[in-house]
Image (tube, rainbow, N blue to C red):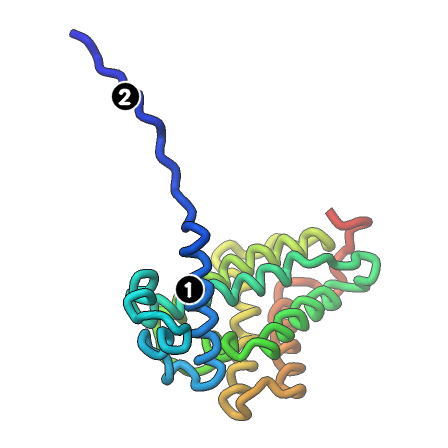
Amino acid sequence: MTTKHDDSKPTTARRPRASSQARIAQILAAARALLTEQGVGGLSIYSVAERAAIPPSSVYHFFASVPALLEALTADIHAAFRASLQEPVDHNALRSWHDLSRLIEQRMLAIYQDDAAARQLILAQHGLAEVTQADRQHDIELAGLMQVLFERHFELPVLPSEVDVFALAMELGDRVYARSVHLHGAITPRMAEEGMRVFDAYLGLYLPAFLPKRAASI
């Protein structure tokens, strides 16, 4: 009995073509503009298509629904948060872990302040479960990057495995910012300070006040 050999080459996932990537970027830019002007309530596949000056079928080709479109935009926004955690940090300028905590929050606050779509999707009360779930999943990824950043500069104690300390710290800080957006339509300087204090205070439940600093970042 002979055995047939499979000479086919393994398939690999293909990236979207450049034209498709450009169209997706065009759609997300239109959605971002509408969110800034009208909030989530003013968003529909047809309004996005009109703003992007393309047929609705072109939007449906990439995004089957408004929640799918908003999930993609949420991922786009979180890419900016990830980039902020990957920016250089001056190790010598850090006197304690509180300095690093504040630097991280200031970077994230700057993104919220400059991006109305980020405030609408992550901080506003839109009631879209799909977007909220996507945001939480991205927060878990951000929390991992944040912990790595802390470990790069300080010797962290053993943290509980059943609680994601950094993810909860971010979520608690975001709740303060969300309250400010709900009450004032923006993150006021006072509420920005309160959010940073909440973030810092929660981390302080697990990180000692005087955390040993590494001789050099790793």
Residue for badge 2: 6
Q: Residue 81: where, in percent of width, then height? A: 58, 64
**Mark 1: secondary structure:** helix
Nearest the eye: 33 or 72:
33
Where 32 sits versus 191, above or below? above
Residue for badge 1: 72
First in sequence: mark 1 vs mark 2: 2
Q: Residue 69: where, in percent of width, then height? A: 37, 68
Q: Quadrant of residue 172?
A: bottom right
**Mark 2: secondary structure:** loop
Neighbour class for label 2 at 10 Å: few (<14), some, many (≥20)? few
Between the C-alphas of marks 1 and 2, the distance is 38 Å
Which residue lies at the image location 37% right of the left edge and 84% below the top edge?
Answer: 42
Q: Residue 58: where, in percent of width, then height? A: 32, 65
- The disc label shown at residue 113, or none: none
Q: Amino acid at mark 2?
A: Asp
Q: Quadrant of residue 88?
A: bottom right
Q: Residue 115: where, in percent of width, then height? A: 56, 76
Name the side, left or right, on which 124 lies relative to 60.
Answer: right
Residue 135 in view in this figure: no
Which residue lies at the image location 62% right of the left edge and 75% below the top edge?
Answer: 109
For the N terminus, which image quadrant? Answer: top left
Name the side, left or right, on which 65 lies relative to 184.
Answer: left
